[in-house]
Image (cartoon, rainbow, N blue to C red):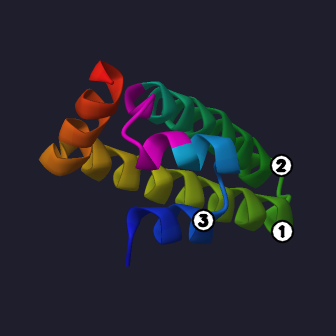
Amino acid sequence: MTYRRELERVTTLSSDDINDACRGLRIRFLINHCVDELLELTELADEALADDRIEEHVMLMQEVAAWRETTHLLRLMDADDALRAGAAHRGAA
């Protein structure tokens, strides 16, 4: 599967963010955004669990998993030499 298809599948990022990431742009910014979402959602999930709001906890943990997968994909993209080379080429144009 392509990066685009995988990012679209997890449905965490906007189409503009996905377009930028697939062009090799703003990837580190997007990684930081994902980590922020992970931290916030994990805290909310922990609170829900502590308050015995089990259904909410399960839903939030699904969101955490989606953001974690997005972070993983973006880190793979950030390490992809071909993607970085394409972004550098577009930046020079």
Badge 1 density bin: few <14, some 14–19, many ≥20, Cα 10 Å: few
Over which residues does the magenta segment extend? 20-28
Q: Badges 2 and 3: C-beta atoms under 8 Å apart?
A: no
Distance from Cα at disc 2 to Cα at disc 1: 11 Å
Residue at x 57% of width, y 29% of height = 36
Distance from Cα at disc 2 to Cα at disc 3: 33 Å
Foreground mark, 2 or 3, reads 3
Q: Quadrant of residue 28 in the image?
A: top left
| Residue 54 x/y as whole percent | 80, 65
Disc ID at residue 51:
2
Q: Quadrant of residue 89 in the image?
A: top left
* Residue 26 falls left or right of residue 24: right
Say what amino acid the circle numbered 2 marks: Asp
Q: Quadrant of the N terminus?
A: bottom left
Q: Does 27 lie within the magenta span?
A: yes
Question: Label 3, on which residue?
Answer: 8
Q: Which residue appears farthest toward the left when viewing the image?
A: 81
| Residue 71 x/y as whole percent | 43, 47
Question: Label 1, on which residue?
Answer: 55
Instruction: Decide which of tag 2 and tag 3 comes sooner along the chain.
Output: 3
Say what amino acid the circle numbered 3 marks: Glu
| Residue 5 x/y as whole percent | 51, 71
Badge 3 density bin: few <14, some 14–19, many ≥20, Cα 10 Å: some
Badge 2 density bin: few <14, some 14–19, many ≥20, Cα 10 Å: few
- Please, what secondary structure does the residue beneath circle 3 have? helix
Instruction: Decide which of tag 3 and tag 1 comes sooner along the chain.
Output: 3
